[in-house]
Image (spheres, rainbow, N blue to C red):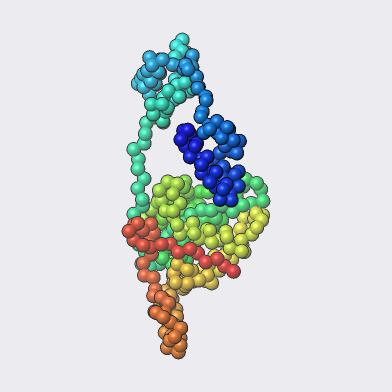
Amino acid sequence: MSAEDRKEAMKLIDQAVKDGARRNKACEILGISVRTLQRWDQRDGGEDRRRGPLNGPANRLSDDERQQIISTATQEEFQNLPPSQIVPKLADRGIYIASESTFYRTLRSVNLNTPRGKKSNIKHSRPSPLISTGPNQVWSWDITYCRSIVRGLFFYLYMILDVWSRKIVGWAVHECESNELASLLIREAVRREGVDEDQLILHSDNGGPMKGATMLATLQMLGVVPSFSRPSVSNDNPFSESTFSTMKTCPAYPDKPFESKEAVEDWVAEFVNWYNYEHLHSGIRFITPADRHHGNDRDILQYRQEVYQEARKQNPSRWSGETRDWTPITEVYLNPEKLESVPVQPEQKPA
């Protein structure tokens, strides 16, 4: 802090004290201690009497030595190596230029202390938007962990969700992650739902079970088009993530780990039944996924609309505008473009 700034700070503190403030609080606001203020006051502004060293460090590198470090590190044989590799290689040749830390410090000063290996040119673009206008057009699937009573061991819940209706169309619990087991689940869900060839897109993340050879071969055989999220981007698979969140945050989810695979299956079966047939999903106008999946949502929403219209006729003063929107949602987007406002609605938790 310059002498002028110190004097200005002293004036501000004196004025604050005259106005009723406490000196230590005023000093705290300016980021100084009361002792520092006292020292400044004794010296009429507290001129800094420190002179500092007159000479540089005796072991300071010369310009030629710094340039030698930079030239060595940028040679073709060393340009892809960090100093931790360069210094030992030079020592093996009987050459000592500087310590490893000096290499790092020098390269950092000229902005060369960055990863200098071969950079990947692969760019992962956002997945193309998928539009669903009816059931069994776009499915989303993923795997989540369920804790076991043995520390470090888990049960794995495989779950397939219809994006348009939000209905869970397939699930299974296993003791490992496997693309073979996943392919069996997909095959069974496709058979049960009566999905035709070239009718369905199956979206998932980039995990091993999702991109395994058996899984991809099964999808090709069934005529199902695979779609994948970007690596390490969970937001590209929001419907499955949201469903797992609903499952694990509902009050009925066990506080303790599961004792067996059968215990997980029993609990998940109850959850799926509740989710599909009782849960009023906020993202689809509070219709159960099963009703929407089987085409009952239009009649239900039409009836709700009539109830609201009749209520408005009976007591119009209670409405200042239109009644609640019970219009069916006809399109559901997976990974919509930023310009399109199609938010994924948060899930309602069961009571």
Compared with residue 10, is residue 288 higher up or lower down, i.e. above or below? below
Measuring 47% from the left and 66% from the top, which residue is drawn there? 167
Measuring 41% from the left and 65% from the top, which residue is drawn there? 164
Residue found at the very far left of the displayed protein: 339
Compared with residue 35, is residue 313 higher up or lower down, i.e. above or below? below
Which picture quadrant has residue 73?
top left
Could you say which is closer to the camera, residue 47 or residue 271?
47
In the image, taking residue 164 as reference, residue 253 lies left or right, namely right
Could you say which is closer to the camera, residue 63 or residue 131?
63
Q: Position of residue 287 (x, y in %)?
A: 47, 72
Could you say which is closer to the camera, residue 27 or residue 236?
27
Q: Position of residue 169 (x, y in %)?
A: 48, 63
**Can you see residue 102?**
yes
Compared with residue 210, is residue 343 higher up or lower down, i.e. above or below? below
Instruction: Report the number of discs.
Output: 0
Which picture quadrant has residue 320?
bottom left
Q: Position of residue 194 (x, y in %)?
A: 41, 66
Q: Position of residue 185 (x, y in %)?
A: 49, 57
Measuring 47% from the left and 72% from the top, which residue is drawn there? 286
**Can you see residue 199?**
no
Residue found at the very far top of the displayed protein: 94
Measuring 51% from the left and 44% from the top, which residue is drawn there? 12
Q: Quarter of the image containing the C terminus?
A: bottom right
